[in-house]
Image (tube, helix red, strand yellow):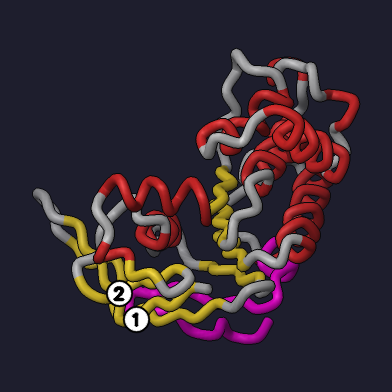
Amino acid sequence: MLAVRGLAKSFTGPRPRSVFADVDLDLAPGEYLAVMGESGSGKSTLLNLIAGLDHPDHGSIEVDGVNLATLNDDALTILRRRRLGFVFQAFHVLPYLTVAQNVALPLSLLGVDGKEATRRVSTLLSKVGLAERDASMPRELSGGELQRVAIARALVHRPQLVLADEPTGNLDADSAAQVLRLLREQVKSQGAAGILVTHSRAAANTADRVLLLTASGLREPAPN
């Protein structure tokens, strides 16, 4: 599902610096990976590169056999809409839409509407325990509920690759545990590949395997 080879990224400016180099990664359908790293190690940058939101200095990224370097901006946008799902720390739920409307957004962008869209949204909201909140506005929800909305939105179009960037960073311990369990369950049930970026060892331990991002690439973390 995902093949990364020799990936390198640096930032220019008054204080240019290398973020990381020689990143190699293979991810199969159904596999759920956690990537850890110190603050500033480039975890979010790595997700942005995999999503085609940024461009590497060196290396290649293939999503389901498609080399991102061969795609123009329009093609990258289409790939993200069809094949990727995103879960962010800050939720990014639109405040002027209901819960159901927020979840339905990826389907609207893909031209899926009517009964099929309603069915998919209803199914996902039931799975994340928000069936009774479909008509609620985001301001009426707790942080944990907002993140569950974000997970449903990320999965409703059945993406092949799910990218979660510190999805529990703004949650209390109980809500975080619930969201992590839900995210894993839903990624697995849909047969998607998933990458969870986190600074939390407890969160990382919910994944199938854990890798540590360093300036010289990804490696196995030291035992606890």
Q: From this viewpoint, which residue is outermost toward the left?
A: 14
- Percent of width and height locating residue 61: 35, 71
Residue 91 seen in this snapshot: no
Packing grade of label 2 (10 A; few <14, some 14-19, many >=20) is many
How many numbered marks are there? 2
Does residue 206 show up magenta in the picture? yes
122 horizontally vs 154: left or right: right
Does residue 18 show up magenta in the picture? no
How far apart are the two marked residues, 2 and 1, measured between alpha carbons? 5 Å
Depth order, front residue of 161/114: 114
Label number found at residue 5: 1
- Percent of width and height locating residue 47: 44, 58
Depth order, front residue of 203/139: 139
Specify the segment rendered in magenta.
203-224
Query: Which circle's residue, 2 or 1, is located before the other in the chain?
Result: 1
Q: Residue at x 71, y 42 (%)?
A: 152
Q: Residue at x 75, y 65 (%)?
A: 188
Which residue carries the number 2 mark?
60
Q: Residue at x 76, y 31 (%)?
A: 115
